[in-house]
Image (cartoon, rainbow, N blue to C red):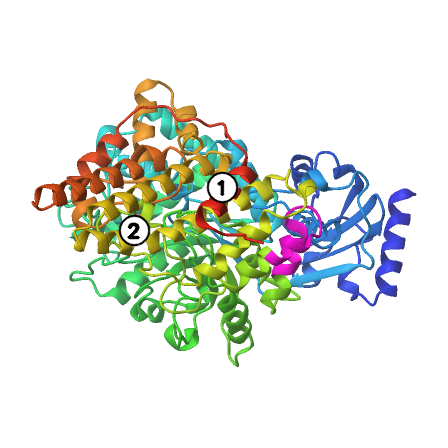
Amino acid sequence: MKRPLQRWLACLLLACAGVPAVFAATPTKPAFDTAPARAALQRLLPRWQAQITLETLDPLKGPDRFVIYGTSGHIVIAGTTPAVLLAGVETYLHEVAHVDIGWPGDSLSHLSATLPAPDAPIKSWVAVPDRYALNDTDDGYSNAYLDWPAWEHKIDLLALHGIDEVLMTVGTEEVYRRTFRDFGYDDAQMRAWIPATAHQPWWLLQNMSGFDAPLSPQQYARRVALAQKIVARLRELGITPVFPGYFGTVPPGFAAKHPGANVVPQGRWVGFTRPDWLDPRDPLYAKVAADFYRQQRALFGDSSMYKMDLLHEGGRAGNVPVADAARGVMAALQAAHPGARWVMLGWQHNPLPAVIDAVDRQRLLIVDGLSDRYDGLDREKDWHGTPYAFGSIPNFGGHTTLGANADVWLKRFAAWRSKPGSKLRGIAWMPEASGIDPAAFALFTALAWEPVPDDESAWFKSYADSRYGGIDTHAEAAWRILAETAYAMPSDGDSEPQDSLFEARPSQDVSTAASWSPRAMRYDAGHFAQAICELLQVAPALRDTSAWRHDVVDVARQTLANRARVLLPRIEAAYAAKDAARLHALDTEWLSDMALLDRLLASDPDFLLGNWLAPARAEAGNEAEAAQFAYDQRAIITVWGEREGADVGGLHDYANRELSGLVSGLYEPRWRRFFASLEQSLATGKPPEKIDWYAMEHAWAVSHEEEPATPQGDPWQLATEVTQRLGLCKP
């Protein structure tokens, strides 16, 4: 009698609270199995999960939705899918228990032994049906060697935030390998063409191939096994895996193997030769596409969404009419997966009008990467009435830089959604590397749920109240400052903050580390710096959380990094004035800041180079693979590829990041050598030494030195040292 009585009480409670009938727990046969959500609770909340009852709501009787109610120690969460149930759990933790499971950092150590009850039922439903996550580059920049437990946690976090569509590229290399064995290529040829794991996203985008290849057959098998677990878990939770589709990429020499095939060379992409493109009008294209989808289905099953971008970042159509190409791609997709949607990235000139006008636009979803970057956008006009998701790319390459255009998100999402004739039907969370900025992730994904947040200051106050496991006025003050600075950047042509000059290839007038990063501060650095003073005053009882430790290191790190933009012009002026004593003093100050930065970063596991490299070593089957994988990981965050791509293409330091071991191992030695050349120049009257930066960086990338994976030092003490060094936090 316990379960029927519980449901009867649930309906009574909800009715008394005025909750619509669609929120009442289903009294008949469950609409789906809650076991996958229960298993996630056991992973996320092992000490508390028994106090949470999961119930189903009929997904056919309304939009995705959840409701939370119950009594102390007996919390009930009802929802329309397993993932939606987990979104209800996250809302409960945030709004009722005042704790946070962030990406990264959590405050679960402050969750009370007996779960508190909500004062009244809490209900929420989706504002938009498509909740899409992950960038094409995510598998490379987030860490391409993550094992299943790490991926399992990643999926749990996406589900906690209501995501229902996840781009899943892992294992696609095996689909290509199997497909083109059927079209005349042997195993060695395919493995020579497909890059090492961290660089595969750009091969899938048709930008490059071959780098750090070949991978062993064992690595292909490991990746397939991992992908199958990922896909199975997504489906269990009611999340749609979004697979790469086939749009015509072929290995070298395809036309020679298949005389008469119309193959269009794609030229170069920032220093790399792009893979060739098979004309989708060519009868052979339909055969290759059918084989590709057959192989993909055999490995990973079917989906209803496939991601493809024709002529990405400068691809060449050659003699192929783009509209005809689009029709050929769509026809092959529909032949393999009737009714499937073609997902496209809104980026630069993509998608071309000829593409979207050539096919059934209701079978398309454009995930917009520029929603918050520019003013004057009209997506209904730009994309001729094609359904789209409001999206952001708030971080490029995995930069450890804090902030986002969050105020733009709140205002623009609401305006675009309410616009007459709006085709907005989703959100798209697409940082180039995920798991970098927990506040940005939490706020952006909140847009998809009613009631939609519309007050930035109120949202950040609520976030501060749960982030460290308790309400604290200093935490609220810190996040108010962050909301007014790093999270209040405008739509001025950029969607990420400035990166750190500590990571830049040295010069006297360098303004950015990555070639395409913002070249100046995008917020008031002085006001931002006060946030660290507030974080250091958070109650000692709340400082034992991984969330607080991560944030205090992150904010102190950013404060110190911002200081570099003040110091560098002074260094330039001292050199121009030929003031050797002042130049030496400023050089010493800069290098001392970098030494302190490395020690600060070493105090938290999220900022250790060793933890970036460890998954690659763990994935390797032998020492040769370990060396190959380590180079793959080291290269992508420094030189990226070979010399032409780094120096001519501008890819060096594209994925720069402040990690202990990277700062001390490469960034600081670069600046030390540069400063020595300036001081030597003043002493001799000769021009500064010309330094081959690529040679220095490549030597670091191929090194095999093991890096610590265990934090050292006290974050509070080291962050305090930063404030003392910068003269902050004075009474």
From the viewer's perspective, tell me whether residue 195 is left or right of residue 709: left
Looking at the image, is mark 1 or mark 2 earlier in the sequence? 2
Q: Which mark is residue 187?
A: none
From the viewer's perspective, tell me whether residue 19 is left or right of residue 303: right
Which image quarter is the C terminus in? Answer: bottom right
In-front residue for pair 5/498: 498
Kind of residue sitting beneath label 2: Ala
Instruction: Identify which residue is drawn at 9% across, 46% down.
Output: 687
**Residue bearing mark 2:** 514
Q: Quadrant of residue 497?
A: bottom left
**Residue bearing mark 1:** 721
Which image quarter is the N terminus in? Answer: top right
**Camera-side mark, 1 or 2:** 1
Q: Position of residue 542 (x, y in %)?
A: 67, 43
Q: Is residue 465 above or below residue 721?
A: below
Mark 1–mark 2 distance (CA, rounded to whole Å): 28 Å
Quick one: label 1, few (<14), some, or many (20+) residues within 10 Å? some
Quick one: label 2, few (<14), some, or many (20+) residues within 10 Å? many
The kind of secondary structure element at disc 2 is: loop
The kind of secondary structure element at disc 1 is: helix
Instruction: Identify which residue is drawn at 58% across, 61% down.
Output: 480
Q: Position of residue 235 (x, y in %)?
A: 57, 44
Magenta span: 460-477
Q: Is residue 486 above or below residue 300?
A: below
Kind of residue sitting beneath label 1: Glu
